[in-house]
Image: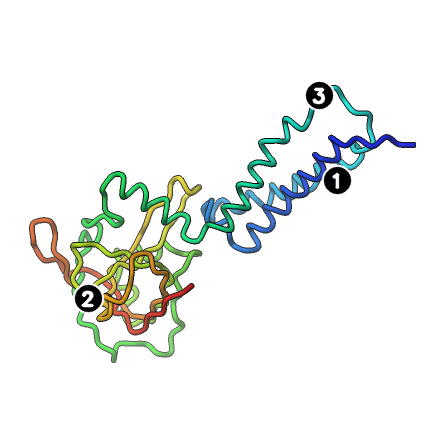
């Protein structure tokens, strides 16, 4: 009769949980709260490797128990899994909250003011320029850097319908009908997160709160903000035609 090694069986269960945790994070998109999209491909390799190790671990379940207490070694992994599940349930705007904490501690602004007017742009918005036959450009967690591209190269997007999924940033240097439509980008992990954004012109901005998740439909336009010396700058912006608050 084969012996049953509980320690090895416990390690087998932990491997399965670890594998399924990564699969769950990727399949639900929650992985994006912890790493950048360009790093996800490496987690597919991780899933394959853990699966292989798990299969080979089966035979170790029926071996004599060793002198080493494996439970002590498993504790950090089990603790990490528990913390991971808790953070998934409470993530909401996890990355944005972390950035907000840093902003409050350092008394800095969410969006660098100078970055908004470093690329000046003047354009008279006209509904007749809208190309209704063109596909709407969607900007969300898969391509957040496009917000920067619109700010830097607004001419490319003139007349194109834009659908932007982001959150509201309010700054004291904005005009009363202005908000910043923000998104968070990560190169590697949550530690290198930063906010990118573009000014949006919206006549009901007073109804919005900081951090509100929003879906914006609009077009490229130009707007005006003042710098630290009270000099006006004409900048790229989004003329918001429709705004919805997302849950």
Q: 207 left or right of 31?
A: left
- The foreground one among 66 and 223 is 66
Q: Where is residue 209 in the image (x, y as percent from the top left)?
A: 29, 60
| Disc 2 to disc 1: CB gap under 8 Å | no
Residue at screen point 71% across, 35% down:
10
Dot 1 falls on a residue whose secondary structure is: helix
Residue 20 disc label: none
Q: Position of residue 101 (x, y in %)?
A: 32, 43
Q: Earlier in the sequence, mark 3 or mark 1?
A: 1
Q: Position of residue 70 (x, y in %)?
A: 68, 26
Q: In this view, does 32 lie above or below 235?
A: above
Query: Pointer 2: what residue?
Result: 177
Dot 2 falls on a residue whose secondary structure is: loop
Query: Which quarter of the figure is the C terminus placed in?
Result: bottom left
Q: Alpha-carbon neighbours of circle 2 within 10 Å: few (<14), some, or many (≥20)?
A: few
Distance from the alpha carbon under mark 2 to that under mark 1: 60 Å
Q: Which of marks 3 and 2 is nearer the N terminus?
A: 3
Query: Pointer 3: what residue?
Result: 68
Q: 44 left or right of 237?
A: right
Q: 57 left or right of 202?
A: right
- The foreground one among 121 and 245 is 245
Mark count: 3
């Amino acid at each position: 009769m084969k012996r049953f090694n509980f320690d090895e069986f416990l390690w087998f269960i932990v491997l399965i949980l670890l594998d399924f945790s990564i699969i769950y994070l990727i399949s639900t998109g929650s992985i994006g709260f912890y790493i950048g999209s360009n790093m996800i491909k490496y987690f597919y390799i991780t899933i394959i490797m853990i699966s292989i190790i798990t299969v080979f671990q089966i035979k170790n379940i029926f071996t004599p128990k060793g002198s080493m207490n494996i439970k002590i070694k498993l504790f950090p992994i089990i603790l990490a899994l528990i913390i991971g599940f808790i953070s998934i349930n409470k993530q909401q705007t996890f990355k944005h909250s972390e950035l907000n904490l840093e902003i409050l501690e350092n008394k800095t602004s969410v969006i660098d003011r100078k970055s908004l007017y470093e690329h000046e742009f003047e354009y008279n918005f006209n509904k007749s320029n809208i190309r209704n036959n063109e596909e709407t450009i969607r900007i969300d967690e898969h391509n957040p850097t496009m917000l920067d591209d619109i700010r830097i190269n607004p001419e490319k997007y003139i007349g194109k319908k834009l659908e932007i999924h982001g959150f509201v940033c309010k700054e004291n240097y904005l005009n009363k009908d202005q908000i910043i439509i923000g998104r968070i980008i990560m190169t590697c992990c949550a530690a290198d997160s930063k906010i990118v954004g573009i000014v949006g012109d919206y006549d009901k901005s007073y109804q919005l709160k900081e951090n509100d998740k929003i879906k914006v439909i609009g077009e490229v336009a130009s707007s005006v903000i003042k710098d630290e010396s009270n000099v006006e700058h004409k900048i790229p912006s989004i003329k918001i035609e429709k705004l919805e608050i997302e849950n």
